[in-house]
Amino acid sequence: MASSKPSPSRRGGAARRAAAPKAARAAYHHGDLRRALIDAATQLVTEGGSAALTVRAAAQAAGVSIAAPYRHFSDRAALLAAVLAEGFDGLAAHTQAARQAAPDARAALLAVGLAYVDFARQRPAVYRLMFSPECDKANHPALMAAGDRALGVLLGAVADVQAAGLIDAPQVQPLALAGWSLSHGLATLHADGMFAGKIPGALEDNARAVMELLLSSVLRAAPGRRSGAAPLHGTKKQDTPPMPIR
């Protein structure tokens, strides 16, 4: 008479099937799943560029089920937009810290430009995607807002030099545009590897030299302190109307 007991192999298979839902539930209860997915997606981009980022790959890297990301992100574009929004906020924090540490308005504007280039040096893969057409920023308001915050640091620094009497009011927007174009151009050339073997010297030294050239050609010598002059870089509000990043 055949034994009614399940074979060891069947018992093992049943145990694995029973454990699988528990493991999936444990993986899903990740703590902050959205945070884990953005971190995983950022790491994928950092290591492999845009092509490495898929929702499946982010889920696997975060240790969750393939379906779990869709609780927070509708598709790959939404996940990428979240990564890039954090990139712009990181850029804003990096440049704002440099601005606040500078001793005066001129130095602050120079520091913002150098910090901008330094951010691209530290995070070239993310920086490239931040300004690439791969993600349609107009479809992601949070990403647009983050881009405006990052640009707002530069605009505020330019407004500070105007408040300090180093330029006239009509020059604020042209100088902001020139400074942004210069910083972004240097950062992009470096991120794309165009400086390697072609331009001698350290990136920071070259960036400082060309930015000093711009400032020296535009800014006046600092006048004496005027009564009622605006603070150099301590205001928290937006100093000038933003030029949206598209």
Image (spheres, rainbow, N blue to C red):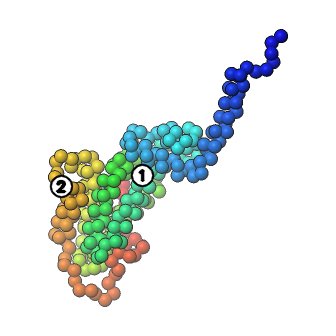
Task: Tell me the distance, in whole angstroms, between the alpha carbons under discs 2 and 1.
Answer: 30 Å
Observer-nearest residue: 12 or 92? 12
Residue extending farthest front:
8
Residue extending farthest bottom:
227
Label 1 crowd bin: few (<14), some (14–19), many (20+), radius 10 Å = many
Residue extending farthest right:
1
**What residue sits right under mark 2 in the picture?**
201
Quadrant containing the N terminus in the rendered view: top right
Residue drawn 29% across and 71% down? 108
Q: Quadrant of residue 67?
A: top right
Residue drawn 56% across and 49% down? 33
Q: Quadrant of residue 230?
A: bottom left
Residue 95 in percent (x, y) is at 35, 64
Residue 51 in percent (x, y) is at 39, 38
**What residue sits right under mark 1 in the picture?**
84
Looking at numbered disc 1 in the image, what kind of residue is underneath it?
Leu
Residue at disc 2, secondary structure: loop
Looking at numbered disc 2 in the image, what kind of residue is underneath it?
Gly
Observer-nearest residue: 156 or 104? 104
Residue 213 in percent (x, y) is at 17, 65
Residue 82 visible in the snapshot: yes
Image depth: mark 2 or mark 1 in front: 2
Residue drawn 19% across and 66% down? 212
Residue drawn 38% across and 76% down? 234
Residue at disc 1, secondary structure: helix
User: Would you place residue 207 above or below residue 157 in this image?
Assistant: above
Quadrant containing the C terminus in the rendered view: bottom left
Mark before the other along the chain sequence, 2 or 1: 1
User: Would you place residue 223 above or below residue 140 in this image?
Assistant: below
